[in-house]
Amino acid sequence: DAKTTQPPSMDCAEGRAANLPCNHSTISGNEYVYWYRQIHSQGPQYIIHGLKNNETNEMASLIITEDRKSSTLILPHATLRDTAVYYCIVKEYGNKLVFGAGTILRVKS
Amino acid sequence: NAGVMQNPRHLVRRRGQEARLRCSPMKGHSHVYWYRQLPEEGLKFMVYLQKENIIDESGMPKERFSAEFPKEGPSILRIQQVVRGDSAAYFCASSPLERGFNSPLHFGNGTRLTVT
């Protein structure tokens, strides 16, 4: 599975959009982009995933560039409860999830 | 629909004892994954099981660790003769994972093992 690169940490003001970038320049055609987050001491929480089209659900939006080499997770109105480690994972469907270091998002009031 | 259930939430064992961690997948899910998270470290894959089969155990330590997912009942991660270095959070995830069916893994809230 392709590797991903994420910034180690980001800050966001409460109520503003949080835009979390992810680079995956070696992604192949069968690989999906998945986003999970882990709030302190809890299990990872699935957020969203996509192949090549932009996706939106009740939690977030996923924007994937046309060449699929990078993506952005958007939390439209961040709250303090969105403070967590966010993981961008690229994998072929059916393979296991391999977690990297992720991005620590701190939402501040 | 209940989520992935793991028990116990906290488990304390003395060095040399056995630890048994249980995971009940979401209803309708027949695939289970186990991950370990050492203190201040990332999540590491351990093993992937289907009912009665181990599919991928590339992340399992070669000794003392075993996992099963019987036809009936929860998946069990068993650690024999625990050592202090086994102290960690152990997370289970499940999925239906049918080929061509696009579904993510869903995780439980983990079992925190402390070895004294």
Image (cartoon, coloured by chain):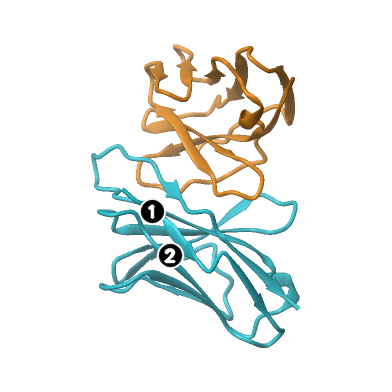
Q: Are marks 2 and 1 in contact (CB under 8 Å)?
A: yes
Q: Is residue B52 left or right of residue B5?
A: left
Question: Mark 1: which secondary structure?
Answer: strand
Q: Quadrant of the C terminus of chain A?
A: top right
In front: A95, or A46? A46
Residue B72, given in percent of the width and then of the height, sits at: 27, 73
| Residue receiving disc 1 | B94
Specify whether residue A5 is in view.
no
The residue shown at (61%, 17%) is A19
Hey, what amino acid is under mark 2? Cys
Crowdedness near tag 2: few (<14), some (14–19) or many (≥20) residues, C-alpha within 10 Å: many
State whether residue B11 is above or below residue A104.
below
State whether residue A45 is above or below residue A30.
below
Query: Which label belongs to residue A22?
Result: none
Hey, what amino acid is under mark 1? Ser
Query: Judging from the image, what is the letter of the chain drawn in cyan?
Result: B
Q: Is residue B51 left or right of residue A43?
A: left
**Is label 2 or label 1 in front?**
2
| Residue receiving disc 2 | B23
Q: Chain of mark 1?
A: B
Q: Is residue B44 left or right of residue A45?
A: right
Query: Judging from the image, what is the letter of the chain drawn in orange?
Result: A
Residue B79, given in percent of the width and then of the height, sits at: 57, 78
Q: Is residue A57 left or right of residue A77?
A: left
Q: Earlier in the sequence, mark 2 or mark 1?
A: 2
State whether residue B9 is above or below residue A93.
below
Crowdedness near tag 1: few (<14), some (14–19) or many (≥20) residues, C-alpha within 10 Å: many
